[in-house]
Amino acid sequence: MMKKTNTKKNNNRRIKSVMMTIVVLLAVQPLSAESWKKLKDDRLHDPEAPALEVLQEPTEALSVLPPGGSAGNKVDWAKALRDDYIQPRAQIDKDAKLEQLDTNILFKETGDQPYVLFPHKTHTEWLECSNCHEKIFKTKAGETPVTMLGILSGEYCGVCHGAVAFPLTDCIRCHSVPIDQAGKFQ
């Protein structure tokens, strides 16, 4: 019992440490679309790289897309898809057909945080099911032991969120269901 408790405490410490790092990063990152940094100044790209001049600057690429959120690239990608700003492929195979699901999954294993309502529709509008199932998530609800530490470490939802989808710093976008209102979502 002692080992399990210590492991849980260590995981909680790691989560708090990662979250504090995110808070610090948010404090030093610009929060408005008008302040996207130039690639040579973003501290991600090598300012001496000769290929840098052929890359599109974030302001040019992202400012024409619908705004969304206060973190990350500040783009509402679901709206960009629905309003035909972008036409991504579901798979490498351009003829792959999408099976759009309009179901939600309520994740209640969130400690004292609001529950997470996962909208299949938003994801299946542009991703074929096999992108996530069975590699990242088991198809049967409740069979994948999703943890915040795993997500922050780039597993589960963190495979995309924090990489190509809205960042993990926008907590309320996922933790959106107050515990006392969960009955409305079941």
Image: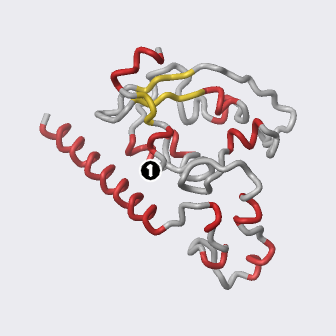
Q: Quadrant of residue 7?
A: top left
Residue 7 against residue 137 in the figure, above or below: below
Query: What's the residue type where badge 1 is placed?
Result: Ser
Q: Is residue 135 left or right of residue 128?
A: left
Q: Quadrant of residue 99?
A: top right
Q: Residues within 10 Å of mark 1 (few under 14, many from 20)?
A: some
Residue displayed at 77% across by 27% down: 98
Please give the name of the residue rendered at 85% of the width and 38% of the height, measured from the top-left corner.
Answer: 94
Colour treatment of the image: secondary structure
Residue at the left extreme of this rendering: 2
**Residue sitting at 54 percent across and 61 percent down?**
31
How many discs appear?
1
Name the side, left or right, on which 186 lies relative to 149. Answer: right
Residue 112 image offset from top left, x and y in percent: 29, 34
Give the quadrant of the N terminus. top left
Quadrant hosting residue 39 = bottom right
Which residue is disc 1 drawn over? 153
User: Which residue occupies the foreground of this view, 176 or 20?
Assistant: 176
* Spot occupied by residue 137 in the image (x, y as percentages of width and height): 53, 31
Q: Nearer the viewer, residue 74 or 139?
A: 74
Residue that lies at the very extreme toward the bottom in this rendered image: 48
For label 1, the SS is loop
Query: Percent from the top left, x then y, of residue 81?
Result: 75, 40
From the viewer's perspective, is 45 left or right of 95?
A: left
In the image: residue 78, left or right of residue 158: right
Residue 151 at x, y = what percent?
Answer: 45, 44
